Image (cartoon, rainbow, N blue to C red):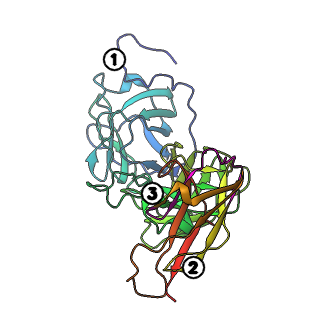
Amino acid sequence: MVIRPTTRRRMVAGLAAVAAVGGAVIATAGAANATGTAPFTITKVAPTILASDMKNTVITVTGTGFDESDFPTDGSGVALSSGGTDCGTPIYIVASPTTLVIKTTTNDCDAGTGVVTLTDAAGDPAVTSAAGAFKFVDPPTLRTLDSDSDGTNDQNAVMTDATSGLPYAQQAVSLPSAGGTIRVYSGSTPFQNDTANKLPLSATLGGKSLTSVVMHTGGDYFTAKVPSGVGANPTLSVTSAGVTVSFTNADINAFTVGGATISLSSTSGPASGGGTLTITGVGTSWSSASAPSVQFGDQTIASSNVTVVSATKLTITVPAIDDPNTTGANSGPVEVTVGTGANATLQSATSVYTYLNF
């Protein structure tokens, strides 16, 4: 490839080695007229599904007759649009006579049908990709803690499915081992499970594929089972509508698999409370010299009522429910946690206690 010093080239740094990948076959638009015919054609655009509103997205156009000398020197010869709206001015490189590599420079490609338009310097009819050949879709997002203005309805993005109905501070963000079920909430963009077009919803945690992925109606969340080998502090990747986005461990509320956890000797009891509850820890090192704090729903158990039996066993007296006038068979459930504070505690899917009205 010869760089002509007289040509002001729109160039994507470092993309000279990018190879064309599979994509849809595209028709060439713009018939020849009295002014002539453009010297190039488009036969493919890849990939066929791209994330919307993403800067630095790379698109490979395959065709014939690509030569830098045929494009206007002001960079206007290559245009990109989505849903009929201009995506800003892309940068490009003519990698070979059959390959043109484009990179978006702004976050302006909204969800919709994408179109590549090529124009030569001579003013011949433009060559465009056919409608429907590729598209931009909104990438998956996760719920954030500040999803509402006052924080009263805050939720974790990822938690154990068993504690998903509890208040934010009581949701479990860890699993003791593989095999448990988690719930993952979407953010501003609902998840999509487009099996009809072979674009199923899928996800990985710590690089391991989640199994039994089931999307809730409307795409506000999905549940999935955690496989073995995930480990502590994993990242999460979600593929929705053909677009994959990776999220850091911080994005998923420091969710972890393995490590210390707790279980209860009983998971239900009368609303009046009373009786001794044993909390068994795995991987704990409790000491009678400094009894850990125990939270029973939104009630803190006084340290004088926490007995350290061993490094892995505590006993407490079950407190009465906050509201003894609650009606219905169940007056719970509440999350039992042991530790230093909300979301910095030991908790698990088996540390949920349900008050019953007898």
Compared across the picture, whether 261 is left or right of 23 comes to right
Coordinates of residue 8 in the picture (x, y in percent): 33, 17
Q: Earlier in the sequence, mark 1 or mark 2?
A: 1
Q: What residue span does the magenta drawing correspond to?
A: 280-299
Q: Is 27 part of what is drawn in magenta?
A: no
* Cα separation between marks 1 and 2: 78 Å
The residue to which callout 2 is attached is 269
The residue to which callout 1 is attached is 8
Compared across the picture, whether 6 is left or right of 245 comes to left
Q: Circle 1 — which element?
A: loop
* Cα separation between marks 1 and 3: 58 Å
Coordinates of residue 277 in the picture (x, y in percent): 63, 69
Compared across the picture, whether 123 is left or right of 243 comes to left
Coordinates of residue 256 in the picture (x, y in percent): 61, 49
The residue to which callout 3 is attached is 169
- What residue type is disc 1 on? Arg
- What residue type is disc 2 on? Gly
- What residue type is disc 3 on? Ala
